[in-house]
Amino acid sequence: LLERSNVGAVVRSAAAIGADAVLVTPRCADPLYRRAVRVSMGTVFQVPWTRISPWPDGIAGLREAGFVRTVDRLLAIRRLTAQSTAVGGSDLEVVAAGANDAFVDVLLAGYEVDGPVAAFIRTEHRLPIVQRFLAVARGAPIAAAAMTIHGDVAVLGGASTLRACRGQGAQSLLLHHRLLVAADAGCVLAVATTRPDSVSAANLRRAGFRIQRRATWMRT
């Protein structure tokens, strides 16, 4: 990764899923560069990281140390323009959510997680820098999505939909709404991370994001 904002987004995602460390290639942008630090929301100082050298032969060292490649993550990148348009024809509406429990409750209910992971997500999404949005159907919130802005880069954060309400286009609507908000704020780039073959990945592709695959390693 040569774009410092993307490096920050990857490190932030690594922190969110509880990764033990982040490995970067010799040509990767410096995770300690100020823009990478801002986009990571400071998690570059929390998650250990190091460079793999030489590349790609250094991968053999990971295998010798007992690591195996597991499910990869996707990095999605899209340039923003002032001509971005909203999605129409939906019975849903998007509203801005304040720093209250309603947003986090919907987000966690959609993720269906608890324990330390839920505690991390709850704490992260209460930070003042986080912009929070809810998709509402007939007056009731059914989906949540977050975003942070760092200079001219928008990082699309956590997003989930209540199980009983999936398949109604809530996340597609929330995605396009966040892109509009980011473009109006002067952002020129939007980045996000997701799992391969997920609904989120499909939504990002349909929204014009360029997708890059990133390897994940785990010690056996």
Image: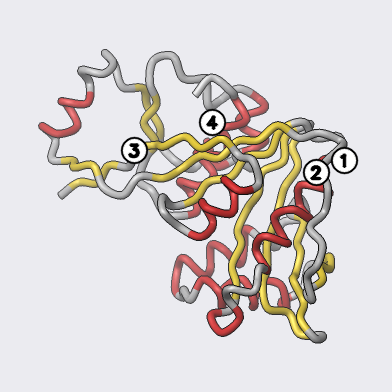
* Label 1 crowd bin: few (<14), some (14–19), many (20+), radius 10 Å: some
Q: Is residue 204 left or right of residue 79?
A: left
Q: Is residue 177 above or below residue 61?
A: below
Provide the residue designation for mark 4.
7
| Secondary-structure class at tag 2 | helix
Check disc 3 and report the residue beneath it: 215
Percent position (x, y) of residue 73?
Answer: 41, 45
Q: Nearer the viewer, residue 44 or 157?
A: 157
Mark 3 is on which residue type?
Answer: Ala
Q: Are marks 1 and 2 in contact (CB under 8 Å)?
A: yes
Task: Give the residue pinned by disc 1.
Answer: 185
- Residue at left 69%, top 55%? 175
Going from N to C along the chain, the mark reached first, 4 or 1, is 4
**Are circles 4 and 3 on residues that touch, CB within 8 Å?**
no
Q: Residues within 10 Å of mark 3 (few under 14, many from 20)?
A: few
Secondary structure state at the residue bearing disc 4: helix
Pointer 3 or 1: first along the chain: 1
Measure the C-alpha gap from mark 4 to mark 3. 14 Å
- Rate crowding at label 2 as few (under 14), some (14 to 19) or many (20 or more) other CA atoms within 10 Å: many
Q: Residue 132: which quarter of the image? A: bottom right
Q: Where does the image place residue 119, in percent across and percent down from the top left?
A: 53, 68
Is residue 199 or residue 42 the one in the foreground?
A: 199
Give the percent coordinates (x, y) of residue 17: 44, 55
Q: Tell me if mark 4 has few (under 14), some (14-19) or many (20+) residues whose alpha carbon lies within 10 angstroms of its own.
A: many
Q: CA distance from mark 2 to mark 3?
A: 28 Å
> Comparing marks 4 and 3, which lies closer to the viewer?
3
Disc sitting over residue 182 in the figure: 2
Mark 4–mark 1 Cα distance, whole angstroms, equals 22 Å
Sequence-earlier tag: 2 or 3: 2
Question: Would you say residue 66 is visible in this rendering?
Answer: yes
Q: Residue furthest front?
A: 89
Above or below, comparing residue 153 to residue 91 in the picture = above
